[in-house]
Image (spheres, rainbow, N blue to C red):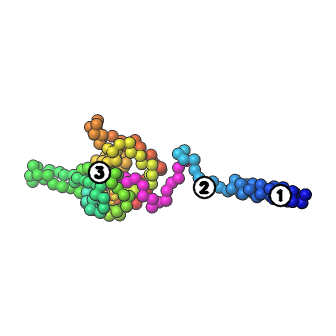
Amino acid sequence: MIEYFSKVFRGAWATVAGMMVTLKYMVKPSVTVHYPTEKLVPFERFRGALLFDPGTCISCNLCVKACPSTCITLENATIPDPKNPAIKKKVAKVDWYTIDFGKCNFCRLCEESCPTKPKSVWHSLDYEVVFFSRDEMVRCWKAGTKFVGQYWDRKEKAFKDPEGQIQIQDVQARR
Ligand code: SF4
Ligand code: SF4
């Protein structure tokens, strides 16, 4: 008889102990978010998708030299030489700039080497970069292009805005 009630008590106590653990976590603040309707904002030094500003770039080539994956290419803007208009002179502006995200290892060396203030190439906090085709992985920028860049659609022979990139925050981190 004592053995029987002892077993009942131990079973009831195990249930109460389990419920106490459940109740303890029920009142604690939640550490998970309802992704994708809720999104965590990464820490300030997070290396998300690269962005570029053709307006501030001085076409110094330092990011191209610093990149260990050889995924950046650019072309200097030129103006006609006033003495001889047939000759084109390079100016400290970029004509076009590209980054191949298929090769990028997100090392931040391009951003660190960039001498402009604020940086002309920088990691955003965006981690939801989705590419629907190989073409979309090569981002291109020209004067007036948005920070996220565009890609060249080889089938339609036209520049297009990337579809897969979702802005985690409206204001992009830029150092
Ligand atoms: S993050 Fe690194 S690999 Fe990617 S473009 Fe910049 S330097 Fe190159
Ligand atoms: S992004 Fe920065 S480092 Fe690269 S060419 Fe432009 S100014 Fe130079």
- Of badges 1 and 2, nearer the viewer stands 1
Q: Is residue 112 left or right of residue 74?
A: right
Among numbered discs 1 and 2, the one appearing first in the sequence: 1
Residue at 72%, 57% (x, y): give it. 21
Residue name at image x 9 percent, y 54 percent: 83
Q: Is residue 76 magenta?
A: no
Outermost residue to the top = 156
Left or right position of 10 against 99: right
Camera-near label (3 vs 2) is 2
Question: Is the CB of mark 2 within 8 Å of ligand 1?
Answer: no
Q: Residue 148, how many percent across, how many down?
A: 37, 48
- How much space separates mark 3 and mark 2, taking CA atoms? 38 Å
Do the numbered discs 1 and 3 sit on residues whose CB atoms are within 8 Å? no
At horizontal 81% and vertical 55% (from top left) the residue drawn is 12
The CA distance from mark 1 to mark 3 is: 72 Å
Name the quarter showing ligand 1: bottom left
Kindly check if marks 1 and 2 are in contact, taking CB atoms under 8 A apart as contact: no
Secondary structure under tag 3 reads: strand
* Residue 27, x across and y down, in percent: 70, 55
Crowd class of label 3 (few under 14; some 14 to 19; many from 20; radius 10 Å): some
Query: Where residue 87 sits in the image (x, y, percent)?
Result: 11, 52
Front residue (pair 15, 82): 15
- Looking at the rendered structure, the secondary structure element under dot 1 is helix
Q: Residue at x 38, y 58 (%)?
A: 106
Q: Which residue is mark 2?
A: 31
Q: Which residues are magenta?
A: 38-56
Q: Nearer the viewer, residue 158 or 106?
A: 106
Residue 63 vs residue 34: left or right? left
- Name the dominant secondary structure of the magenta segment: loop
Q: Which residue is mark 3?
A: 98
| Three-letter code, disc 2 | Val
